[in-house]
Image (cartoon, rainbow, N blue to C red):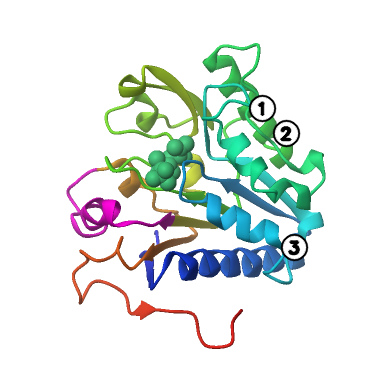
Amino acid sequence: MSSPPEIRVLDTPADLFLAAATEFATLASQAVRSQERFSVALSGGSTPKALYTLLASGSVPNIPWEKIFFFFGDERFVPPDHPDSNYRMARETGLFAKVSDDHVFRVRTEGKDADAAALDYEHTLRKFFGLQLGEFPRFDLVFLGLGPDGHTASLFPGTVALNEKRRLVVANWVEKFHSYRITFTLPVLNRAACVMFLVAGADKADIVREVLENGSANLPSQKVRPSDGRLLWLLDRVAGQRLKPDASPTTFSMPEGIP
Ligand code: 6PG
């Protein structure tokens, strides 16, 4: 039975990213204490860049960097140095300078077609988690964003990947971009120990309300309900401004004294 979403609205984007970084540090320490490693899937797009930059800055203490393993929940089907590459975005924040190269698992798009790149990344996950056929990985943390159409990762409304039940990673054709995206499937997202949606900006206010308050919208981001894990929605105030007062969370700003 999936637990109800925890929704937190932070006053400012800075509060939002600090709250996300603090949650990351706490989850990482807990996972390393209990299992000697922390597996995290990064999201792409523009929103998480400030979070990755904050984590890379070293200003958030007590992060067991030597035990953290980074993956990507989705990737654009472009080379790793392409301006649209999620890997490039994350790398340029300095986040990966905190860990050794063999702790960063990017989607290898070069020299392959999209299906082969997806299958290759699925093999990477199966190997890292030591999975048998039919088994799914349990990431400690999956970061997700929210698109204006309700998509998350690269699971866009009306696309084939939404119906995938067996694969871990697939190539998903996205008509509006006339291109493939490589994306985790819903079974992988819904087996995570913690899924954290990070959403900022007034332009997301309508879709945030739609996703969190319109149960019949049937949007891809609404299909993310970890079966045995936490579902955390971190919003800045303007992204959460359309939520019904009684439904929306307490406005939360970081307590005094937290740097
Ligand atoms: C991607 C993402 C995608 C993103 C949303 C929100 O590769 O683009 O993984 O799901 O999170 O599109 O993007 P913004 O943060 O740029 O609004």
* Label drawn at residue 123: 1
**Residue nearest the viewer, comparing 31 with 16:** 16
Q: Who is closer to the viewer here, 79 or 248? A: 79
Quarter of the image where the N terminus is located: bottom left
In primary-sequence order, the first of circles 1 and 3 is 3
Q: Which amino acid does label 3 sit on?
A: Val
Residue 233: image location, x then y, percent:
40, 61
- Name the quadrant containing residue 126: top right
- Answer whether residue 153 is visible to the viewer in this image: no
First in sequence: mark 3 vs mark 2: 3
* Of 42 and 239, the residue lying toward us: 239
What's the residue at 26%, 58% (across, down)?
212
Q: Distance between the residues labelled 3 and 2?
A: 20 Å
Mark 3 lies on residue = 32
- Image check: 201 left or right of 53? left
Q: Residue 14, percent across and down?
A: 49, 67
Residue extending farthest to the bottom is 256
Q: Is residue 249 visible?
A: yes
Q: Identify which amino acid the numbered label 1 is placed on.
A: His
Q: Is disc 2 placed on a helix, strand or loop? A: helix
| CA separation in Å, label 1 and label 3 | 24 Å
* Residue at mark 2: 127
Q: Is residue 206 magenta?
A: yes
Ligand 1 appears in which quadrant? top left
Residue at 77% over, 53% down:
98
